[in-house]
């Protein structure tokens, strides 16, 4: 065996420890292996709360929206009693999908053989079944999934036994309300989509630290007061906030309004949602990393603001995110993903400091530990 092959063929795993300062990172195969990708379906996505949309998108009886949780198609609709329901998007006859995209309907009519369901999921009409022996429409109501609102953002959980999102995220609602006092007035404004050649966790890792901000995001660090940027981990979420004032005349986007007293507020919510508030006019955006393959994900960034119509200033912030910051992050993460396939890499170290400064990567460690725990990977 040559010295070269000794180093390139196999590298043993080092421990992912509970103490971030002593821990190695999650081994590379967790980002590349199809078996891990498949295991994440039941270990993570079928038991966690997943963002699917916002109440403003189902504001009126009959409004519906569709969403994907891992590989499960879901739709959300508001019924005649003003209740928002979520169902698997599948007809109980022979499995055709019921609805596509978003829209407004009076009832849910399957395109295949025209079975009709009420907005509450009850089967109302099924052609030519009146003489069918033992056929009971009650056996064919749509399958529900749990749905819950957090400040108007809608989340579903495929596990009927899962505890409520509110009970799993104490403190998060208060933080969101603090940084967006208008949060009850915001409505859907725009969705930006990105098809990324990287594992969904590569994208989450990247959000969770600002160690890379100075080298990689020239305009972001001009906008945001970096010395006050802090990441704080709590249960299944983490906060990433810069409480210093933003820079007017910065290179990211024009910022002249003086009504904000922070320069950036972001959150990560397990497993795959990030929440963003930029300085300037009132808004919130959410950026979700949806796994599609072991080494591919789709990202959706949904923007919300009062009346759903962005101001000129907010539109500049939205365009900066879509056209500058997000492409910068996608480039970084696609390079990391190629690196994770390299025989020359298996694990790194989290760079941690006692002050938990803006450079510290403890937020990444917090997430990777949750992944390891969900997958049942031993850590000490
Ligand atoms: S599959 Fe829907 S009516 Fe047949
Ligand atoms: Fe970044």
Image (tube, grey):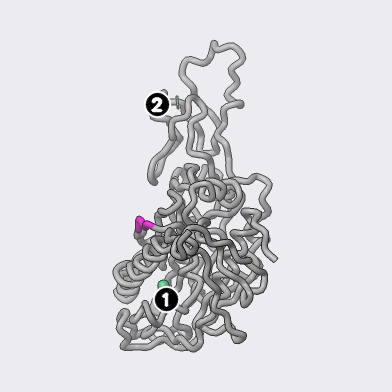
Location of the C terminus (image quadrant): bottom right
Residue 374 placed where, x, y %?
A: 63, 55
Q: Are marks 2 and 1 in contact (CB under 8 Å)?
A: no
Residue under the image location 38 percent in, 88 percent down: 247
Work out whether 325 lies above or below 79.
below
Q: Residues within 10 Å of mark 1 (few under 14, many from 20)?
A: many
- Nearest the eye: 292 or 315: 292
Q: Quadrant of residue 260?
A: bottom left
Residue 255 lies, in percent from the top left, at 34, 83
Between 221 and 162, the residue placed more toward the observer is 221
Alpha carbon of mark 2 to alpha carbon of mark 1: how far? 45 Å
Task: Tell me where residue 18 sits by quadrant.
Answer: bottom right
Question: Is 199 part of what is drawn in magenta?
Answer: no
Work out whether residue 374 can be spotted: yes
Q: Residue at position x 51%, y 79% from top?
A: 241
Where ligand 1 lies, by quadrant?
A: top left
- SS for callout 1: loop
Q: What secondary structure characterizes most of the magenta part?
A: strand
> Does mark 2 have its CB less than 8 Å from ligand 1?
yes
Which residue matches tag 1?
278
Which residue corresponds to the image point at 66% horizontal and 61% vertical from the top-left?
168
Q: Does 52 sit above or below residue 284?
A: above
Q: Residue beneath label 2, please?
A: 112
Residues drawn in magenta: 193-197
- Measured as percent of width and height from the top left, residue 30 is found at 53, 56
């Amino acid at each position: 065996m040559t010295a070269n092959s000794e180093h390139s063929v196999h590298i043993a795993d080092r421990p992912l420890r509970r103490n971030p300062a002593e821990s190695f990172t999650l081994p590379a195969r967790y980002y590349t292996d199809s078996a891990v990708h498949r295991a994440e379906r039941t270990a993570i996505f079928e038991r966690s709360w997943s963002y699917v949309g916002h109440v403003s998108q189902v504001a009126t009886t009959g409004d519906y929206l569709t969403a994907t949780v891992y590989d499960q198609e879901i739709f959300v609709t508001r019924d005649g009693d003003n209740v928002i329901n979520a169902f698997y998007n599948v007809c109980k006859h022979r499995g055709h999908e019921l609805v596509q995209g978003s829209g407004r309907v009076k009832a849910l009519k399957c395109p295949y053989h025209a079975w009709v369901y009420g907005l509450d999921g009850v089967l109302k009409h099924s052609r030519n079944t009146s003489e069918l022996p033992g056929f009971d429409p009650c056996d064919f109501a749509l399958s529900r999934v749990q749905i819950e609102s957090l400040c108007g953002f809608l989340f579903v959980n495929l596990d009927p036994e899962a505890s409520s999102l509110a009970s799993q995220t104490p403190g998060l609602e208060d933080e969101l309300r603090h940084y967006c006092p208008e949060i009850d007035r915001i409505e859907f404004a725009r969705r930006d989509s990105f098809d990324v050649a990287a594992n969904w966790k590569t994208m989450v890792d990247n959000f969770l630290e600002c160690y890379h901000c100075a080298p990689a995001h020239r305009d972001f660090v001009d906008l945001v007061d970096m010395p006050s940027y802090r990441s704080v981990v709590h249960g299944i979420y983490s906060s990433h906030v810069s409480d210093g004032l933003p820079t007017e005349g910065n290179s990211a986007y024009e910022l002249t309004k003086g009504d904000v007293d922070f320069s950036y507020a972001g959150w990560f919510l397990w497993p795959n949602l990030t929440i963003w508030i930029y300085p300037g006019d009132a808004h919130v955006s959410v950026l979700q990393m949806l796994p599609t393959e072991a080494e591919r994900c789709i990202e959706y960034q949904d923007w919300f603001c009062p009346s759903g119509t962005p101001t000129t200033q907010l539109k500049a912030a939205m365009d900066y995110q879509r056209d500058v910051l997000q492409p910068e992050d996608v480039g970084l993460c696609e390079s990391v993903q190629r690196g994770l396939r390299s025989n020359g890499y298996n694990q790194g170290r989290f760079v941690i400091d006692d002050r938990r400064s803006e450079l510290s990567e403890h937020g990444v460690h917090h997430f990777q530990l949750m992944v390891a725990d969900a997958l049942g990977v031993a850590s000490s």
